């Protein structure tokens, strides 16, 4: 009986891992016959778990939608990751899930083994995160509606507030939601403007209306997340630069925070640093603080600012020595 119960739990765990399994695959994973799999599936159904099946040589099984959520089977690392994610959800950029997150966390921690509760508690006690501005928080139902429209290829109609405060109606074909710079953005094809547009989700007023379906288009970039980053940087008037660091990429990774920019290996002693800042002066000072020789590749305006500041620093140091 214990062996059968353990196998049922393993079978349920496998069904939760993938959308669909072939019967032969399940039998191989559990080291049983396909007939045993069929009997175990029948037992799961008797226990109230909706397992759908297809007949034939290539027949398979998948966990269907039911009235109740089946038990979620997690390994140690997955359980810790989910618990930490729930702990941080109350300070996130999605509103309306704080209370649900607390309830979910309480249920999860109640069934966590003691050694995992200690790990989760330690991570919570000895880590900290800056809170995200509540003005950028968006309702989780709004995000779900937009994501569903993108999945089902349905147009959306909504009222949108521009940065100057003016509102207007938009008809769009949603493609992707991206979380960047502590905000949620919708990448969509604007039907009336016949072009790609980026919309801050927190500026969408009210509940969008679903419209007719649309044929999918090629997205504005292969990497949509990077596309959003470039658009946001440009909209904020930030400056970008490419710099050759006289450091191996391995060493540069230790000195340069990941959020500061992208590092690309050139050879064993140099790497390319693509970065951005609010202004060239601040970026020049930051480059000097890395503590290595560097060459500005582009843009010329940044190279000129580095030269200007280098002269100013040299004169200040000379005056200090003479004084």
Image (tube, rainbow, N blue to C red):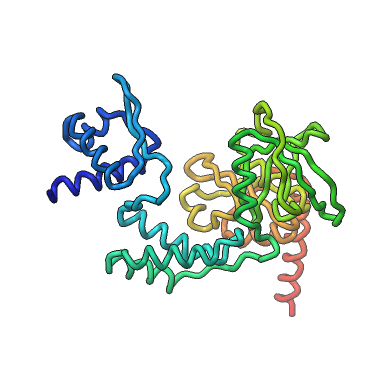
Please state which of residues 284 and 174 is positioned toward the viewer in this rendering: 174
Q: Position of residue 35 (x, y in %)?
A: 19, 30
Residue drawn at (69%, 45%) of the image: 230
Q: Position of residue 77 (x, y in %)?
A: 34, 55
Can residue 101 be seen in the rendering of this structure? yes
Q: Position of residue 91 (x, y in %)?
A: 57, 66
Q: Residue furthest front?
A: 46
Image side of residue 197 versus residue 83, left or right: right
Image side of residue 5 versus residue 213, left or right: left
Quarter-wise, where is residue 257 in the image? bottom right
Can residue 232 be seen in the rendering of this structure? no
Q: Position of residue 281 (x, y in %)?
A: 74, 60
Image side of residue 74 versus residue 314, left or right: left
| Image quarter of the C terminus | bottom right
Residue drawn at (74%, 56%) of the image: 280
Vertical relation: 200 (above or below) 86 = above
Please state which of residues 131 and 272 is positioned toward the viewer in this rendering: 131
Residue drawn at (12%, 49%) of the image: 1
Image side of residue 31 versus residue 313, left or right: left
How many discs appear?
0
Q: Residue furthest top?
A: 57
Quarter-wise, where is residue 96 in the image? bottom right
């Amino acid at each position: 009986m214990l062996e059968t119960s353990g196998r049922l739990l393993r079978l349920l765990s496998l069904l939760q891992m993938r959308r669909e399994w072939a019967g032969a695959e399940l039998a191989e994973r559990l080291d049983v016959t396909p007939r045993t799999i069929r009997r175990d599936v029948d037992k799961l159904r008797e226990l109230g778990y909706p397992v759908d099946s297809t007949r034939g040589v290539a027949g398979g099984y998948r966990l269907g939608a039911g009235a109740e959520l089946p038990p979620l089977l997690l390994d140690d690392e997955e359980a810790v990751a989910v618990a930490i994610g729930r702990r941080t959800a109350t300070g996130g950029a999605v509103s309306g899930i704080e209370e649900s997150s607390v309830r979910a966390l309480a249920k999860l921690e109640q069934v966590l083994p003691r050694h995992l509760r200690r790990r989760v508690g330690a991570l919570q006690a000895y880590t900290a995160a800056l809170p995200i501005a509540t003005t950028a928080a968006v309702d989780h139902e709004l995000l779900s509606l937009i994501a569903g429209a993108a999945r089902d290829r349905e147009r959306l109609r909504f009222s949108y507030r521009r940065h100057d405060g003016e509102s207007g109606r938009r008809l769009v074909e949603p493609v992707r939601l991206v979380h960047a710079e502590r905000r949620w953005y919708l990448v969509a094809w604007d039907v009336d403007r016949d072009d790609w547009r980026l919309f801050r989700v927190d500026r969408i007023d009210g509940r969008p209306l679903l419209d007719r379906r649309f044929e999918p288009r090629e997205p504005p970039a292969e990497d949509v997340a990077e596309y959003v980053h470039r658009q946001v940087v440009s909209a904020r008037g930030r400056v970008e630069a490419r710099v050759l660091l006289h450091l191996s990429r391995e060493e540069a990774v230790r000195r340069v925070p990941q959020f500061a920019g992208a590092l690309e290996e050139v050879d064993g002693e140099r790497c390319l640093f693509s970065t951005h800042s609010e202004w060239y002066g601040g970026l020049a000072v930051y480059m000097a603080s890395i503590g290595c020789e560097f060459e500005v590749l582009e843009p010329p305006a940044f190279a000129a600012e580095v030269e200007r500041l280098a002269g100013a620093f040299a004169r200040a140091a000379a005056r200090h020595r003479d004084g």
